């Protein structure tokens, strides 16, 4: 198993892509996964759904005190983590997504930036020191940070300006970490996602909207959270040991660069 003996922490684990990544890591790749949610009961329920070594963790990525407490706990219980997946994101809201840029409010922008961007910053900033110490004790393994973004961060979009802005900044965070900490055996990646059929996205759209989205990429279909999880597992392994800072586009061939 590619992630055997590795400790992974996945934010936003209680549903969607975060759940799929946690499940793939624990069940198929042999990792010990810290399943995180703002609600501990949701984290526990999620942990119980996964076959493998998991631990439920209450975590609000927007609360720095909460983040620091989780860091201390992982060091005490596991000696730190090997893989950090920043998957927590602000929920999809039609009222925000379909509002024109010139009508975008600071309140909406701040709400999304607080989770998608600042949450990622809080987590990486807090976990980097212990991750570096852990990798320095290992002769072979490196620490891995995987940040979740979206294809509009690369190409721009006609809708969802606050989401696009936040995710574009997440790409920059990944690049900075890769360059600054590459010589300390830390690798960083961004997953730029296209139309992934999660409950939060797929079922929020009308049937004509879903059909239109399916026809956009070369593969003429939606992607699945499980397909995203398999890519994340590969990045978390040592198979990508000489690659870092990359933005991996998972969109069925809509945006090809």
Image (cartoon, grey):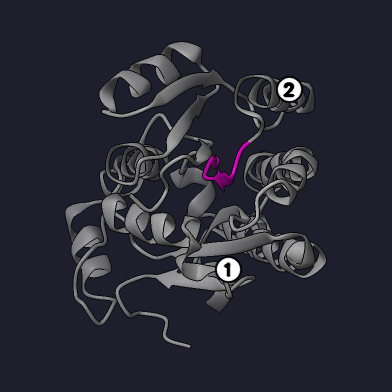
The quarter of the picture where residue 17 lies is top left
The quarter of the picture where residue 127 lies is top right
Q: CA distance from mark 2 to mark 1?
A: 33 Å
- 89 magenta-colored: yes
| Circle on res. 129 | none
As drawn, is 180 to the left or to the right of 19?
right
Q: Is residue 158 above or below residue 197?
A: below
User: At 41% from the left edge and 61% from the top edge, which residue is drawn?
Assistant: 234
Q: Nearer the viewer, residue 143 or 95?
A: 143
Query: Looking at the magenta stretch, what is its main secondary structure?
Result: loop
User: At 75% from the left edge and 38% from the top edge, which residue is drawn?
Assistant: 130
Dot 2: within a 10 Å radius of its alpha carbon, few (fewer than 14), some, or many (20 or more) residues?
some
User: At 37% from the left edge and 27% from the top edge, which residue is drawn?
Assistant: 53
Q: Nearer the viewer, residue 23 or 114?
A: 23
- x, y percent for residue 223: 26, 61
- x, y percent for residue 246: 58, 73
Dot 1: within a 10 Å radius of its alpha carbon, few (fewer than 14), some, or many (20 or more) residues?
many
Which residues are the magenta region?
81-90
Q: Which residue sits furthest bottom?
A: 257
- 85 magenta-colored: yes
Q: Secondary structure at mark 1?
A: helix
- x, y percent for residue 190: 56, 63
Q: Give the number of the mark in front: 2 or 1.
A: 2
Q: Nearer the viewer, residue 170 or 174?
A: 174
Q: Which residue is mark 2?
A: 72
User: At 33% from the left edge and 57% from the top edge, which residue is drawn?
Assistant: 230
First along the sequence among labels 2 and 1 = 2
Q: Secondary structure at mark 2?
A: helix
As drawn, is 32 to the left or to the right of 221?
right
Q: Which residue is mark 1?
A: 153
């Amino acid at each position: 198993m590619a992630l055997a003996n590795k400790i992974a922490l996945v934010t936003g684990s209680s549903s969607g892509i975060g759940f799929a990544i946690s499940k793939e890591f624990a069940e198929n790749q042999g990792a010990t996964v810290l399943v995180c949610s703002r609600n501990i009961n949701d984290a526990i329920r999620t942990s119980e759904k996964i076959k493998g070594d998991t631990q439920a963790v209450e975590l609000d990525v927007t609360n720095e005190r909460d983040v620091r407490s989780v860091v201390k706990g992982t060091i005490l219980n596991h000696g730190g983590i090997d893989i950090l997946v920043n998957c927590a994101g602000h929920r999809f809201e039609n009222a925000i997504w379909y509002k024109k840029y010139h009508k975008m409010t600071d309140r909406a922008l701040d709400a999304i930036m607080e989770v998608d961007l600042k949450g990622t910053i809080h987590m990486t900033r807090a976990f980097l020191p212990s991750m570096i110490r852990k990798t320095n004790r290992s002769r072979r393994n490196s620490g891995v940070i995987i940040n979740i973004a979206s294809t509009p961060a690369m190409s721009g979009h006609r809708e969802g300006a606050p989401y696009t802005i936040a995710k574009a900044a997440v790409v920059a965070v990944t690049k900075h970490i890769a360059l600054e900490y590459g010589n300390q055996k830390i690798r960083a990646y961004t997953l730029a996602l296209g139309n992934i059929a999660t409950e939060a996205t797929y079922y929020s759209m009308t049937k004509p909207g879903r059909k239109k989205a399916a026809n956009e990429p070369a593969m003429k279909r939606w992607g699945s959270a499980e397909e995203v999880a398999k890519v994340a597992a590969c990045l978390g392994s040592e198979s990508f040991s000489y690659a870092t800072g990359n933005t991996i586009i998972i969109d069925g061939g809509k945006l090809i660069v």
